[in-house]
Image (spheres, coloured by chain):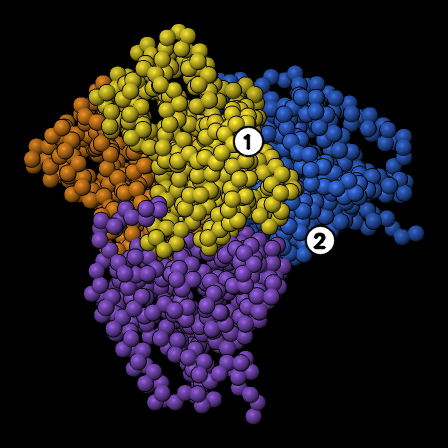
Chain colours: A blue, B purple, C yellow, D orange
Amino acid sequence: MTKAYHLKLGLSDEETLNMYRYMVLARRLDQRMLLLNRAGKAPFIVSGQGQEATQIGAGFALDLTQDYIAPYYRDLGLVLVAGMTAKEVMLHLFAKAEDPNSGGRQMAGHYGHKEKRIITGSSPVATQVPHAVGFALAAKYQKKDFVTLTTLGDGSTNQGDFHEGLNFAGVHQLPVITLVQNNKIAISVPFDKQVASKNIAIRASSYGMPGIEVDGNNPLEVYEAMKTAHERAKNGEGPTLIEAVVERLSAHSSDDNQNQYRTEEELAESKGRDCNLSFRNYLIEHELLTEEMETEMIKVIDKEINEATQYAEKAPYPHIDTINDYVYEM
Amino acid sequence: MTKAYHLKLGLSDEETLNMYRYMVLARRLDQRMLLLNRAGKAPFIVSGQGQEATQIGAGFALDLTQDYIAPYYRDLGLVLVAGMTAKEVMLHLFAKAEDPNSGGRQMAGHYGHKEKRIITGSSPVATQVPHAVGFALAAKYQKKDFVTLTTLGDGSTNQGDFHEGLNFAGVHQLPVITLVQNNKIAISVPFDKQVASKNIAIRASSYGMPGIEVDGNNPLEVYEAMKTAHERAKNGEGPTLIEAVVERLSAHSSDDNQNQYRTEEELAESKGRDCNLSFRNYLIEHELLTEEMETEMIKVIDKEINEATQYAEKAPYPHIDTINDYVYEM
Amino acid sequence: MSEMNYLQAITSAMDEELEKDENVFVFGEDVGAKGGVFRATDNLYDKYGERRIIDAPLAESGIVGVAIGAAMYGLRPIAEIQFADFILPAVNQIISEAAKIRYRSNNDWNCPITIRAPYGGGVNGALYHSQSLEAVFSNQPGLKIVVPSSPYDAKGLLKASIRDNDPVLFFEHKRAYRLISEEIPKEDYIIPIGEAMVKHTGTDVTVITYGLCVYQTLQVIEKLEKEDISVHLLDLITVYPLDKEGIIQAANKTGKVLLITEDNLEGSIISEVSAIIAENCLFELDAPIKRLAGLDVPSMPYAAPLEKEFMISEDKIEEAVRELAEF
Amino acid sequence: MSEMNYLQAITSAMDEELEKDENVFVFGEDVGAKGGVFRATDNLYDKYGERRIIDAPLAESGIVGVAIGAAMYGLRPIAEIQFADFILPAVNQIISEAAKIRYRSNNDWNCPITIRAPYGGGVNGALYHSQSLEAVFSNQPGLKIVVPSSPYDAKGLLKASIRDNDPVLFFEHKRAYRLISEEIPKEDYIIPIGEAMVKHTGTDVTVITYGLCVYQTLQVIEKLEKEDISVHLLDLITVYPLDKEGIIQAANKTGKVLLITEDNLEGSIISEVSAIIAENCLFELDAPIKRLAGLDVPSMPYAAPLEKEFMISEDKIEEAVRELAEF
Ligand SMILES: Cc1ncc(C[n+]2csc(CCOP(=O)(O)OP(=O)(O)O)c2C)c(N)n1
Ligand SMILES: Cc1ncc(C[n+]2csc(CCOP(=O)(O)OP(=O)(O)O)c2C)c(N)n1
Ligand SMILES: [Mg+2]
Ligand SMILES: [Mg+2]
């Protein structure tokens, strides 16, 4: 029998199982947030369902003691790996004072946490790409060997900031990894009406860096590509563009209804490629996971989510007297 | 003896000679404008010396009865082919009321002439790229078969507007040709500090269109690539990106001193690749041009330039009472 | 006549102009099959097809730039920016290009583009889905900026914008979309750009404002009338360039002026309104020119109590009017 | 002390801050070997090398965006925009990002970036090398906008900007670069951001302005003093957010206020100044608040007579002061 893929990559059984645990946590947290939204308790959520494998595979390839990430709004899985807790996510969802991302100032999905080296993000897409490149410039400037990872969607690669940021990274061969989560749609606009190139990876050739397309439904494939890119970055060999082809299992956001623009077949097909299911099968096949283990895992996760929800729901909003704080340094 | 290149391309001897006549006109007009600047008669000029072959080769491939061009500031050669006269250029240089480009409102090199289908341009680089794409969209929308040509410099391909414009052209397969005049420098910043890709043509792969690199010192090579692109555009086969590698024989503009950042060797090498000289040799070699013919040609051209200069110098400035005109439709 | 809300009025203006003029087309993110994230282009894709209702790639500078090109050629693009907050990547195309095309070419070229953008707060939109962005563009001759306050106005103004031969930024208040309804005539009509409109005549206090704040002020007026506080209300409608004459007349009418905007105070549209009054009506004024505006913080936070704290409300307007009336 | 022009003062401020703080670096188009198109970074490349004086690709949004990233990390970038006119492609990074980073992260992150940009006309720059762009940004809490009027101020303010822990837009008037010289102390000094400065005390008329217009007004003051017209001159220095107290005091000083900007009139910085005065000083005013500004055309044309017609001049200032004095 050939060696299992994860072992070939140098991932222990335990680490691999831990990947899955994060995927389940991200999925169930996301589902809970959607429920809370439907129950009228949270005005907005933007879901990452179907993109967990990519986000968590990528996160596992980082050196979390020093690397920086500039995530995008679907990156629940990634920020969890980076150290954000379910409680912090829920505090953010409910816009409570204790929310470490924004103190209740930003909509759900707008991450930022300096202590965990999560760079604060905004809503206009792709602005984080030059920021990540700026962090990479700082690494080179200060001769440090941390790596910066930024992520964005396929549609967002059409923004000028993607082009300008990556060109700079290429000219200066900076230690930055750009991970495009290609779910083949941007709100309602499908890939072929959105992106003129045959895929996203090929855009790397405009920037003098390798461009790698991977199956984003497989966290191990993403991990592998990320590890290579991470090595390159650390060794001063410059930036990498990775395209992970993923599924968007839910609507664009809680404000969207994807039946307006996607057929039932398309949605069913997408569901058939659910990364959590396929990775679960992999783990079972390789005897890393049993039904009992999973039941236990889910129990622990749900407890965490329940506690997080309860805590965050009860937590106070920021006081209105704080509204003028921190426009400038105080 | 094999057939001469221009004949293979279907260009008659006369047309080929006419190309050269435009190259000489553009060169001598440019030189005169520089002299006028040095003499304190014109505050600013941006020179196109070294890029005539590309501009004129490109212009000859157009259908001037219907095609549109969105040129950039160095495109003296191109706008001459499009029908602008030396007199009009001089009126523009001196910012006189009769200037058809802007009525004396814009700096030299900011072309625009609706009757001749030259789209009005501005100073911020690359903004004309989406405009040209918009004209191409209009062609498709109205089922007309005109083609739109836009040009820009190598450095300017780093702007977001280049990326966003070309992506749209690629998605909709629009009849637009983007001609990058790569003189391997942007003011003082050399290509390798400016552009991360190995050349400009490869950037076409980001936009689902062919990217062609040609020797921009040879007007026939540019003509050939342009003709192919023009055919494709007319046949509904979509956009093309052409990179013409050219020389910038003069400083960036009359405000610049290139000795600050270019070595003497570099400048001498560049001079050695003067397109007007090499094309002259080609014509002499193929017995299309004699010294006498050239002397006569220059005489006629210089007369035109002299008359244009005299006329434009004497022409009145726009009246100050017109300063508020045409902010909006009147 | 038929009852329409602000959003339907906008859709029907586009529908009628698309019907009337083959050169009109709609261009923006998700405007096609989805009908726009606010459904402003609902059904237009089915009716006019993908040639005329064009889903754009996610690239605002490209959207505006391509639309400018098409407009220079002679088409009449209606470009939709999904949220006004996302107009910022297109600022260069709007200010350097659209605004200056006629002037720089000495009238040789022009740019008949309409850019629609949903703006404003009170919709749980937080920092990046709530902003008022009109002030960013209100120092740019060559542009016109229109902000309708009612369905009737929205329809007539959008039609006027589409037919205008110069670029128009058309800001639509998101909260107004479904909040405000009224009867709209079936016949074609336009409302001229550039003219402020008196929306209520009164004698004690003049309120000058635009957008959703007009609606909010009208509610307050109704209430205060019962107490014999009489308010004169001017709706600016076109916030750039401003209707100077209309402003001067309205200010002189009562001598007590309250200016309102949902935008941050400093550097907002109402600053210019105040300057016009201070230049022209000084000796008619009985009280300092009062301004009521959003807070000078980057934009309204997400947390409900903070959003409320930021937003203009009927209570805040009422209090400000009373203060002036008693001055 | 040594005599320096405005440009040299700026170069020397950067030089000293580069020397003092290893985290300071310069980033922009042609700032390296060429030393900048205006030579503001002259010799810095030779002195500090390509690690700290970085030639950027031609992409303003990228320049500002990359600098923002480096600033969030903890470096102190000085980004140069070659001409203020070309800051427009970077508006999204400046307004959506730099201005909002501290607020949106509830003080977790901050963005100590300085963006230098040469602005202003009277240099044969035509529409796209002459503009005053400060008003585009003067409605954005989180930003600071500084416009120095003299070499001494320029040096002290640029140093303060570089050391500031929030984003600062630093607009330098191109015509001032070589026009204005003065003695500059050898010692390190800074001038605080946010405070307007009285540049001349007087009793008849208050002039409030900034940038090159301060210099022009000083020339006029000298002339008018001989005729016993006494002018009080306030230099705004920080045009956003404005020094309200300083403005109110200066307006009250004489009760006759002339506001000057080289920018287009409508929606300019002086509109806000006027609104502040109209809100706070109404009963101290002896004359309407007068504004002198560039014309409301897209920008100044190239043809010399038209550029002159657009520009603020000493003659225009003198006439306006006289009118007010006689009011
Ligand atoms: C500059 C800008 N324009 C528009 C939007 C509105 N918007 C939010 S997400 C989105 C689609 C993004 O698609 P993609 O990049 O493919 O990412 P996905 O959501 O599919 O993960 C749009 C248009 C925005 N946030 N920013
Ligand atoms: C947006 C913008 N930024 C900066 C400038 C100033 N500028 C004018 S030309 C130029 C260099 C252009 O280089 P390239 O595109 O290679 O064209 P070339 O001049 O070499 O033909 C620069 C930086 C500008 N015009 N527009
Ligand atoms: Mg997508
Ligand atoms: Mg070049």
Residue position marked by numbered label 1 in the rendering: C7
> Which one is in front, D5 or D199?
D199
Which class describes the residues within 10 Å of circle 2: few (<14), some (14-19), or many (20+)? many
Q: CA distance from mark 2 to mark 1?
A: 42 Å
Q: Position of residue D286 (x, y in %)?
A: 18, 23
Task: Tell me which amino acid carries mark 1.
Answer: Leu
Task: Tell me which amino acid carries mark 2.
Answer: Glu
> Which one is in front, C114 or D118?
C114
Q: Secondary structure at mark 2?
A: strand
Q: C71 above or below D283?
A: below
> Which one is in front, D32 or B110?
B110
Q: Position of residue A122 (x, y in %)?
A: 56, 36
> Would you say residue C72 is visible in this rendering?
yes
Dot 2 and dot 1 within a common chain: no
Q: In screen coordinates, is C227 left or right of C55?
A: left
Chain letter of disc 1 in the image: C
Quadrant location of the N terminus of chain B in the rendered image: bottom right
Q: Quadrant of residue B188?
A: bottom left
Which-is-in-front pick, marks 2 and 1? 1
Residue position marked by numbered label 2 in the rendering: A213
